[in-house]
Structure formats: C-alpha cells, structure tokens
Amino acid sequence: MSAQTVDQIFVLIKAWLMGHVPIAFQPIASAILSVAPVLVVFPLLFAITTVLERKGLGRMQNRYGPNRVGPYGFLQPMADGIKSLTKEDIIPRSADAVVHFLAPLLLVLASFLAYAVLPIGRNMVITDLNAGVLFFFAIGSMVELAVFMAGWSSRSKYSLLGAMRAVAQMISYEIPLVLSAIVVIMATGTLSTVAIVDKQAVYTHGVAHWFLFTPWGFVGFILFMIAATAESNRSPFDLPEGESEIIAGYYIEYSGFKFALFFLGEYLGMFATSGLAITLFLGGWSAPVSFLTWIPSYIWFFLKLLVFIFVFIWVRGTFPRLRMDQLMGLAWKFMLPMTLLNVFDVGIWHLMPHGILRWIVCTAVLILPAMLLSRTLNRKQKLQTRTYRYAD
Amino acid sequence: MLGEGLLKGLAETARNFFGSYAGKDRLTTLQFPEERAPRIEASRNFPFLVYDGADPEAGLRCVSCFICEKECPPKCIFIEKSTDKKPDAVGKQQFYPARFNIDVSVCMSCQICVEVCPFDAIKMDVAFEEASTGRFSDLLWPKQRLAKSNDYYHEIHPTEAAGVDAELAAARAKAAAPKPAPAAAPAAAPAAPPASGGAAE
C-alpha cells in the first residue's frame, strides 16, 4: 500500500461503500457516512480528554490523577458516563421545563455543526462551503443562545448570573476572535476552509507556507487562541462557571446526563475552535516540513489537536481566574487594538515586495505597539483612597 | 513586558508535570490503601477500655464510677453497674460495669472521658478503618468490643502507657505496703495529721 493510499484510505472506503448504494439514496448515504465518524471520533476524544485533563492537572499539582478505574485510570470516563446516565435528572419546579430541556441539546448541536466545515484530512471534510469560516463563526454564536437559555430557564440566581457573565464574555471575545481570523481571509482571499488549507500546504525549501510562520500570522494565532479560550469558557476565562463564587454558573440546575451534555458541548466547542485555529494558522492537515508528508494527513490534524489540548490543560493548570473587569479590559483594551493592528499589518505585508525588509517592517509594526500597550496597561492605576465615615 | 509572568507560571507547572514522572519529590501523594504514612504517636480517634492480664472480663480497669458517662458532651456512653464486686487494677474490691456501651455514631472523639477517668480505664485508640453495614445493629459497641489489652495500649501509645503503668505500680505498692494502716486510719483521721498518727503507730 502506498503512502497515498493510506492517506486517502477513509475517502476510498467511503467511495467503495457508496458504490453499493442505489442512486436515489446516495445523497443521504453520503451525508451519513461523512457525519457518523465525526459523531464517533470527537465524543471519544472528549472522553479521553477528560481523563487526560484530570491526570495532567493532577501532575501539575503534585498528585496522581484518577488511576483506579482500569489500567492507569483510563476507564474513568466509562465510569463517569455510567454514573451520569443513572443519576436522577432533576428539573427545578419553577424552571421552564421545555427551554431547560432544549438548552443542552442546542449547545451540543451547535458544537457539532461547527465540524461540518473542518477539513480533518486531505479530501476529508463534510461540506466544502465557500463561506466556511463565516459558517463556523455563525454557528459558534449559537452557543451563546444555548448558554443563556440554560441560565434563564433554570430560574436560579446563580444560573442567571453565570449566563449573563457568559454572554457578556462571549460577545466581547467574538470580536477579537473574528478579527484575528480575518487576516487569514485577507491573505488567502477565500472563506473556504479547504482552500485555506490548500494555500498553506505548499513548500519552499522544504518548509510549509503556514501562516504561523509570518509575523501577522504568529500574532494572529496567539490572539485567536486567547479569544478561543475565552469563547470556550476555559480557564483562566471560566468566570461563567466560577465554582468559588457562583458554584457552577449556568449549569448549576442541571443534573445527570444533561450536565454531562454541557461538558460534552463545551469540550466539543474547544476542539472545534482548536480545529479552526489549526486550519487557519497551522496548515490544517499539512505537514510542517516536506520530508514528513508521508505521514497521513488526518494523523497530522489529530497530532496538532492533541498538542492544542495539552496546551489548554497546561494553561488551566497554571493561571488563576481573571476578574470581570480584567477580562473585559483584556478584550477591549488589548485584544481589540492588537487585532485591528494585525489587520493593518497583513495589508502592509501584502503590498510590500518580498524580502527581508518586509519581515522587519511587519514585525516592528506589531512589536512596538504591543510593548507600548503593555506598558500603558501595566502601569499602576492610582485609585482614589476610600474613606469610611461610619465603619471605623 | 506583557506576558513575562505568564511564561514563568507556565514553566513552573511544566516542571511539576515532567518532574512528577522523574522523581518522588514532585509527587508527594501516598496511595492510601497500599501505602501508609507512619503513624504519629499522639494520634487518637476513638476511646477503648483497657484491661490488664489476659482476661478482658477479670482485668477490666473500669469500676463503673459513671464519671465519663456524666462528662461525655454528646452523651454517647451508657454504663450499667454490676451488683457484685471484683478486685480492680490496684487490688481493691470494686464494682465493675455489667454493661458498657459507646454509640460510635454519636462519639465525637473529644477525649474528655479519658481526661476525667481517675482509674486510667478508658484511653484513646488509633484504629480508624472501622465500618459497619448495619445502621442500627453495629453502631452501639459493647464492652466486649471496646475492651483492649494493656499490651495493645503499650503498642499504640508507648510513652503514655509507660507513665500510666508506673503510676499504677506506685498505687499498687501503696495499697499493698501499709496494709495494717486502714485499721488505724479511721481512728487517726479525726486527729487530723495522718503522718503523726502513722508515726505513733
């Protein structure tokens, strides 16, 4: 079997299976064959990630993670799944039962829909929409609706507070998220995720044309990842959950499998945004150097995804949660100016002639304002001293 | 520069993560049922009754004076006095508990019963892996279950037990030596100074 056959094995299997389906049923069969693997692989990845996360966080805090269920504790997700399936599903008496029921479903649905445009390997994408990136962000904003439905329908103060925080945070970070992705669209001139990857899977001197290897791509990638962390409500931006202050935020009134569905939706959202970051900046399924192209494309995609997951866990194990004003300050005072500057920078990059000068100018345009911004934002703010008239 | 502290933090957690695979000093957890930390001698968690010798019935130090029952803050001790007498740890004829129960579910391990016991009969145990399957049957521990030998006491609290043994030996010697004294003592008592009374004898 040649390397190309291994690379295309899933595509070939699908084509072979489609040969046995009558013409009338081919559209629906093709859709099912494309969607089913995504519905299996990513929840499985979610299960593995939960145990890896708990183990990794444990190691970072000088303790073992779960290590009792199965070999090295890797059957823990099964135990968790059985537990959440057999638990009583409580709906608060004053809750809006229909909306309360629909919210977790909508969250998972929205998270799954985002995978429709992610190219997992060469020729392996569910639909190649010509507005793929736009579709992704449009679907991504459905998550906010689901979160607010959950918070509102539970009729609990904690839920509502969590949902309000979540919506405020997600809407604030949607702007830098989209603006940091725009640079790639400007550079490639297309919204199709497949075309974006194809543009990056080109090699000069054996190195791929990933957008990560350009000044604006690097900065855009970092900004995108910060915004993606905030979008998926991951630590250190997990204010909507805020165990220590509002217990679990918008899903406090959920129990049993609905609670598990919220977790599933959250992790699927995290994988999807990571997948989009890989697609936009890290060349999707392409290898970083040309002599490694014999490794199948889907393996490259999942390797990159696993690295992303590790970084997410690492970040969660390191940083404390931000305060609400710090969160908003970061979004509006730092992320937004930097993304706008980045958009300007990619324009300069496009118009300047190839060469070392282009690199120097484009790097300087980003680094100098970033340093100035960080110095201004880091300056100690003089707060007026508060005097208490009656408390002393 | 913005992000310097973030990188420092990330480096620290990465050192913890990889260090936990390299050596024990970054992974201090003891895997409890298989591994155990050495017990601290002063640790305590639940009272037990001490008996001397081999027979828990005959050697029980408790004389059922009810002090612990009265002092117990959550009132978890239940004593029933015997009708007959038996020699206690010092050798005197004393009552003994016909029944001595402690409700484990109520006991809060405060050690007050131990502090107030004038006979060194109740002490704190260290066994903590106690579980029972019966909610109503197994939680009221009778004296058969509470009684543990003096050797066991020496094993779990060596220093404390040695002190108690020395005191008891002194009391036994005192009780044994001036044997003729009790006959004269009541007579001498009204005369106030027992020392001079003893000297006159």
Image (spheres, rainbow, N blue to C red):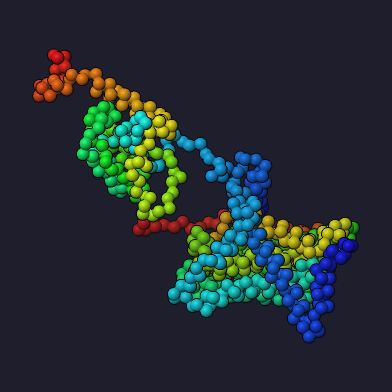
Between B41 and A287, the one lying in front of the other is B41
Can you say whether A156 is above or below B140 in the image?
A: below
B88 sits left or right of A297 in the view: left
Residue B102, located in which quarter of the rendered image?
A: top left
Depicted A146 relative to depicted A73: above or below: below
Q: Is residue B67 left or right of residue A315?
A: left
Residue ID at (78%, 81%) = A26
Q: Residue A65 in the image: x percent, y percent?
A: 60, 51
Is residue A30 visible to us here? yes
Residue found farthest to the bottom: A24
- The spot of residue A44 in percent (x, y) is 67, 64
Question: Going 37% across and 38% down the picture, which residue do you hit?
Answer: B124
Q: Split into 4 quadrants, where in the image is the N terminus of chain A?
A: bottom right
Q: Judge left or right: residue A289 versus residue B87.
A: right
Measuring from the top left, give residue A202's x and y in whole percent: 86, 64
Quadrant in which the C terminus of chain A appears? bottom left
Establish if A172 lies above or below B16: below
Q: Nearer the viewer, residue A240 or A126?
A: A126
In terms of depth relative to the viewer, which is nearer, A240 or B127? B127
Quarter of the image where one finds residue A361: bottom right
Q: Is residue A350 visible?
A: no
The residue positioned 57% from the left and 55% from the top of the image is A320
Determine the residue located farthest toward the top in the rendered image: B200
Q: Which residue is painted at 14% across and 14% down in the image?
A: B201
> Whole-percent x and y of residue A21?
80, 80
